[in-house]
Image (cartoon, rainbow, N blue to C red):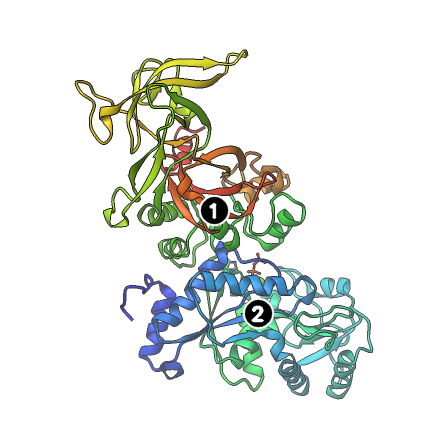
Amino acid sequence: MGNETTAPTNFIRQAIEQDIAAGKNDGRVVTRFPPEPNGYLHIGHAKSICLNFGIARDYDGICNLRFDDTNPHKENVEFVRSIQEDVRWLGFSWGDRVFYASDYFEQLYGFAVELIEKGLAYVCDLSAEETRTYRGTLTEPGKESPFRQRSVEENLDLFRRMRAGEFPDGAKVLRAKIDMASPNMNMRDPTLYRIRHGVVHHQTGAEWCIYPMYDFTHPISDALEGVTHSLCTLEFEDHRPLYNWVLDNINAPCHPQQIEFSRLNLQYTVMSKRKLTQLVDEGHVEGWDDPRMPTIAGMRRRGYTPASIRDFIDRIGVSKSENTVEMTLLENCVRDDLNVNALRRMAVLHPLKVVIENYPEDQVEEVEAANHPQDPSQGTRRIPFCREIYIDAEDFREEAPKKFKRLVTGGEVRLRNAYVIRCDEVIKDPQGEIVELRCSYDAATLNANPEGRKVKGVIHWVSARHGIEAEVRLYDRLFGVPSPDSAAAKEGRDYKEFLNPDSLRTLTGCVLEPTLADEEVGALYQFEREGYFSRDATVNAAARPIWNRTVTLRDSWAKIEQQGG
Ligand code: ATP
Ligand code: MG
């Protein structure tokens, strides 16, 4: 405790500290992260991961990874694999404590039998539709099922035969016998088991045709693992009485405490796995790891670092109040990390050819460039300079107001790490498009100020003879409105109608400085004046490397939002 990796305190940490001080659970702290393997993890899960694993780290406890795999029909091993990869990538380790709720199917079955024997569970033959009407509403009590009074013997026999596969899907369920008049709908004889034939479970294969429900499985899984604090999101607050009822009525090895906290919601995106699955399946994005997705895999591919995501989670804190966090906060965490840790390189995204007419035709010199202007310990690199270079088309104007500090016809500008050049002539194609600039350089200005005049602007460049062609992908927000879910609800439209049509812009003819030739997948740099970029795992159709823009240098959206645009 108290080392520099300790996360900020919150109401859950305070409760745990009190429990430790009071000697509860003999001072032990055991948490778990319980994903359902029915999709990739998203930034909301990162909050739960950092909370559960962070608490275990800071209180000498343990945190289990447990797959909540009771709904096999939407689950698969790809999701199991990706979840492990993402938790590990975020910087957390579960040692050998990876569990599956399906590990407990036999024990769960035993506890269900125990409830039946105690007269606290019964087999019910009502159809799904009938069960709904019998349940009542928030203002009216429910009605007891006609099957509620079955004898223990009959229930034991029917439940055994449910397991043996004698009944079709939906013919019967096992229900808890609690209180059909409870003001809490979750307590109105909730379903504990249902029949599911013909699904092959990714862990247990075809062994089972009955599957336990989440509300029955979760408390028992927690108890079997000796979990002390079962942390979950607020929508489970109303399920807590059922969580406790299950544990109070079976011979449980211990009774974990459920504590709820608010979900992370983030602007300009959606976070439900159902919707993310839809975006993937319907091809609105390239896949779960599309850099625009709020998934951990997408963020990794985009160039977000584990440290910046952990920093973000620390900054938003943990509470019980629902709110939506600004995307800008996440992006600023990424910027803060990369500004310190990413080395600098030069890349031209919209190349405009410049011929330096007074530079010797066959000369190439290597100029020295700092890898990190604020951190000399990062050293320097040498980059080739010659008669033909590219600058960015946006750094040139034929005419421009005085405050345009870049290159204009007849004006001068400094090439970063090299010389001052002057634009002497603009070459256009028959359509009037600028295709090339003719310039001259001042040979006395390599790392030196020009004689007798001031040149304010500095622009980046790449040697046209040595540069590497690349594709650069510029990502913007996936949705065009801050809250696609509430916008859709308010206007009675589908949330997908709010997808941002410009969330991806692909630039194919970019030119990178040659030092970037053999970068590994995931390599991360600041392309000076352009932003932070990360090497993608794929290449494009022309076999050119692809670089993803991780984040811009500054927050361009804040300005737009301030202007109300
Ligand atoms: P969805 O509702 O989108 O299907 P889920 O909550 O069912 O997501 P799980 O795989 O069950 O997804 O989640 C694993 C854990 O992560 C749970 O403890 C859940 O409470 C937590 N979690 C999920 N989404 C968020 C979120 N947005 N913020 C914080 N914790 C979350
Ligand atoms: Mg869930």
Give the SS element for disc 2.
strand
- Where is the C terminus found, in terms of image quarters? top left
Label 2 beta carbon within 8 A of ligand 1:
no
Judge whether residue 277 can be spotted in this image.
yes
Q: Which residue is mark 2?
A: 67
Q: Is mark 1 within 8 Å of ligand 1?
A: no
Q: Is residue 325 left or right of residue 217?
A: left
Alpha-carbon span between mark 2 and mark 1: 32 Å
Residue 56 spot, x, y in % from top left: 39, 72
Q: State the residue lying farthest toward the left.
A: 452
In this view, 523 is above or below 76? above
Which is more toward the observer, 503 or 464?
464
Q: Which residue is mark 1?
A: 535
Q: Where is residue 456 shown, x and y percent of the image?
A: 25, 24
Which residue, as the protein is rendered here, is positioned at the far front? 362
Residue 280 falls left or right of residue 27 = right
Up/down of 426 relative to 213, above or below: above
